[in-house]
Amino acid sequence: MAELTDAAIDAALERGRRAHAQEPRAAAVRYDRAAGRVIVDLENGCTFTFPPHLAQGLDGATEDQLAAVEILGKGYGLHWEELDVDLSLPGLMAGIFGTRTWMARRAGQATSAAKAAAARANGAKGGRPRKAAGGG
């Protein structure tokens, strides 16, 4: 039993070492009021920025609330205490700005000239076709 536990601990430590070497980590974070962006300086010298309105929990925040951002743990996350918001840095950099449900809702709000033109064309044809009665 002890051998199994030691092996599991060793494997977990190795996964942690690999993640530490490969995943992005924040060295510093701040909210730039003039640019309206959260700016994350990474330990590898790169910089990642994003507009806070894209992130779940930050879209209605004041500038003072946004400026009160902290780095979580070893730099893998961002934290806003007053807003009770924690965001994963690797997730943000992968374009994941919230939960799956929240992201799906945001995707439905997207607008573009092409989407507006398609809606107008569909409306000119009478709108969506009626569903057939009987469900089959």
Image (cartoon, helix red, strand yellow):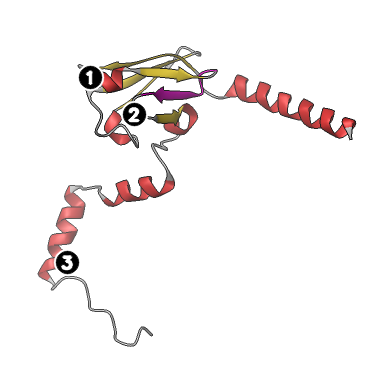
Give how far apart the Cα atoms at labels 2 and 3 are: 41 Å
Give the number of the mark in front: 1 or 3: 1
Q: Which residue is mark 1?
A: 35
Quadrant hosting residue 16: top right
Q: Position of residue 77 (x, y in %)?
A: 47, 25
Q: Quadrant of the C terminus?
A: bottom left
Q: Amino acid at mark 3?
A: Asn
What element does badge 1 sit on? loop
Q: Answer with mark 1 or mark 3, whichever residue precedes in sequence.
A: 1
Side of 18 relative to 52 (left or right): right
Question: Residue 3, percent across and down?
Answer: 89, 31
| Label 3 Cα crowd, 10 Å radius (few <14 / some 14-19 / many 20+) | few
With respect to residue 50, does 135 lie above or below? below
- For label 3, the SS is helix
| Magenta-colored span | 74-81
Residue at figure coordinates x 45%, y 18% from the top left: 71
Amino acid on which the number 1 mark rests in the picture: Ala
Does residue 73 sit above or below 134 in this rendering? above
Q: Residue furthest front?
A: 82
Vertical relation: 80 (above or below) 114: above
